[in-house]
Image (tube, rainbow, N blue to C red):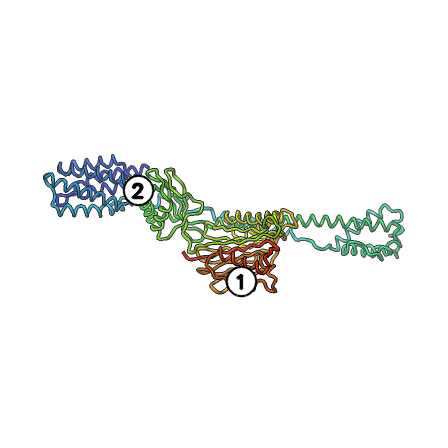
Amino acid sequence: MKKTNAKQMILGILGSFVCGGSVMGCYPLVPAYFAALYLEHMSGFMLLGFMYIGMLFFMPLTAAVKYGVILLVTAGAIRLVEWANEGCPAILAGALAAVSTLILSFCGSLLEWKNQPATAAVFLEAVFIFGAVILLNRILHGVMEYRPPETIPEEKTERGNGERLMNYAESFQGLSHIFYTMSQKKSQYTAEELGQIQNELTGKMCASCESCALCWERDATPLYGILSGMISSIWHVGAPDEAQEQELSRYCPKSRDMVEEAVHVFERANLNRAWYNRLLENRQVIAEQLDAMAYIMKDCAREEKVLDRQERNKIAEIRYRAKEHGIVVENIHLVETVEGKLKLEATLKSRMGGCISMKTFAAAVGHALEKKMRLPADTKTFISKEPTDFVLYEDTLYRNVQGIARMKKDGAQISGDNFSFLELERGELLLGLSDGMGSGSTACKESEMVLDLLERFLEAGFSVETAIRMMNSAMVMRGDSDLYSTVDLCKVNLYTGRADFYKIGAAATFIKREKEVECITSSSLPVGVETQFEIQNESRQLENGDFVVMVTDGVLEYLHVPKPEETMQEIIESIETNNPGILAKRIMERVMLFTGGKAADDMTVLTACIWEK
């Protein structure tokens, strides 16, 4: 603030000396300099004071009176325009100053004031003032906004601490690897474990038996072999073989108790094994979470690049264009994101206290950066008198439109399918489709939960792979063994048109390009079935006018044809439309013809089309 006041004082003093410049009896720099500096929101009383002092020292009395009135008229006209439109462009201010000078010069000629310039000089003076206001305003704005590069705060040129975060990420990955190595499930008993079971059995049954010494001390007693065979039989089929029981009864007076106890021992061993494997699954889930944390840290380590120093001229141009629309830029930063796109962060307010559309500021920023900028979906629409933080992003190359068609299962109150359209701030479109196992409210809640978790993870900045794994970990931890959901995701980069398809237990997806239709299939289990699973991912390059068609398995399974994917391709090829909503509706109508108008399962068709802007 002190530096700004010092600049205003210096420019005001300079205005006093400007009053000494005369050409052909005219002083065109006086109204031009005043109008240009007045647009920079300098105090009107201070500026008029300096200008009047200069006019009294350097001008004849009649000229001082004339130009003093011109300054008052110009100031009033500019303020009136700003009150009506929230801002006054330099072109309009130049026109107002030129017209005011022209009118008062002619009035002076009519009143026969002394030392009045010729008519040609009056017109030339007006033209000069018009151009000088535009030029001087640019120069004075640059002077007012100029800051040496070394005065830009150093902490604003770097964001994050990449080296430390990378070290943390490596530590978390190492810890995750330890948990993975500790999580090897046991599917079979080892010889050592079987021996321990046999020792436990004989120790419990034989130690308290009076015939123990008689049974085990005889050299010809085959109890070891009989018990080993019986334990092996219980392990494989859950019960001992009758022949083994009869043979055991020949050597052991408590053979029946021995068999029952052997079954109980194995039941306890199996229960312990089940709990042990469950513990291992939880360790795997923890390992997945640690991997996710490592990814977050690596992603945060990829620092955004602040361009405040390199692009000082463009930032000054943004401030200048915003000022012409009555917008005060209190704070501004130009950032290059990790994807290489521009992002503008600014604190804005209206100068006159009215409401100014954010589209006006976005257009001004676009002209200054020579790139079209877009506003986030949830941003405020207007700039008010209260300082508010805004963010603008470099606009995408493609726009998208979606469509949906749904049918719930006959007799069901609600569909078990759920869908999602999500456009992320980083310029990506997410199409999501989830089919809960079964139908009705339970399946609906399950698929809704899956998509809700995915949306939360993706909006937080996770990659699709990490979001799917974290969501799967949450579903595994729930412990509901009979409630699973499919996940069908399509991520479209609206800057490049690249589409990535992720399928977990989902039905086929189709891409329509003019008359051609491509089918993308996968074979995997739904989420929540296994702790570790492979995410199938395929990529395609979409072009202007391409459609993406996603369906649930209820659409394909009940076409009652040998190859439903090929039939669906033929259906999509035969539909002529460029409207995604109509495409989805017509696909559903054709499918219902195959099913005889009946819905044996929940059916959902989700469509989307991208066009170049």
Residues packed near mark 2 inside 10 Å, few (<14), some (14 to 19) or many (20 plus): many
Choose between 32 and 360: the one closer to the eye: 360
**SS class, disc 2:** loop
Residue contact between numbered discs 2 and 1, judged by CB atoms under 8 Å? no
Residues packed near mark 1 inside 10 Å, few (<14), some (14 to 19) or many (20 plus): some
Q: Residue at x 66, y 48 (%)?
A: 279
Choose between 315 and 454: the one closer to the eye: 454
Give the quarter of the figure containing the C terminus: bottom left
Which is closer to the viewer, label 2 or label 1?
1
According to the picture, the residue beneath numbered tag 1 turns out to be 571
Quadrant of res 561: bottom right
The Cα atoms of the two marked residues, 2 and 1, are separated by 57 Å
Q: Is residue 423 visible?
A: yes
| Image position of 417 (left or right of 142) | right
Give the quarter of the figure containing the N terminus: top left
* Lower sequence index among marks 2 and 1: 2
Q: Position of residue 252 (x, y in %)?
A: 87, 52
**Amino acid type shown at disc 2:** Gly
**SS class, disc 1:** helix
According to the picture, the residue beneath numbered tag 2 turns out to be 87
| Image position of 544 (left or right of 470) | left
- As drawn, the label of residue 211 is none
Quadrant of res 525: bottom right
